[in-house]
Amino acid sequence: MSRGKGARKPCDVQQARQRLVDARQFLEAAELLDAPDVVATCAIHAAIAAADAITCHALGERSSDGDHLSAVDLLRQVDASLATALKRALDRKTQAGYESVDVSAADATSCVRWARQLLAAAEARLEA
């Protein structure tokens, strides 16, 4: 595996498990809410935390770059389809978290779906 771009931070299985807990909590919050921007933002944070758990477990490191797309590059080393799911969620991060135009309910639902996919993959890896 080639080393991609972006700042990285070493992590161990204990840290991977904590990021898994974070992912579950962010996703739980997303599923309790109705406001599309807040749902999407929580789901996106769940996706990021799940991706961190996966890369910590598989590679012993996670992205610590301010550009979350570095996490996509790192996750691609483990699983390209999961990297695609993370990228799709991240594509909505700026609009959901920082812009005055809300994400659509459909986009928020998609973010939750991608977060669930990443969380399920993280759980399968860490709880196996």
Image (spheres, rainbow, N blue to C red):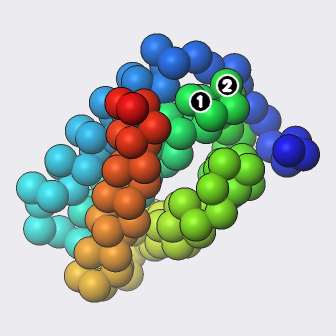
Tell me the residue at 11%/68% (across/down). Answer: 34
The residue singled out by tag 2 in the image is 60
Left or right, residue 79 beside residue 107: right
Q: Amino acid at mark 1?
A: Cys
Mark 2–mark 1 contact, CB under 8 Å? yes
Measuring from the top left, give residue 92's x and y in whole percent.
47, 72
Secondary element at tag 1: helix
Depth check: give the residue in front, 66 or 10: 10
Tell me the residue at 17%/69% (across/down). Answer: 35
Measuring from the top left, give residue 25's x and y in whole percent.
24, 39
Q: Amino acid at mark 2?
A: Gly
Q: CA distance from mark 2 to mark 1?
A: 4 Å
Depth check: give the residue in front, 78 or 46: 78
Toward which corner of the image does residue 31 lie, by quadrant? bottom left
Toward which corner of the image does residue 7 lie, by quadrant? top right
Toward which corner of the image does residue 105 lie, by quadrant? bottom left
The residue singled out by tag 1 in the image is 56
Left or right, residue 116 beside residue 77: left
Residue 71 seen in the current view: yes
Secondary element at tag 2: loop
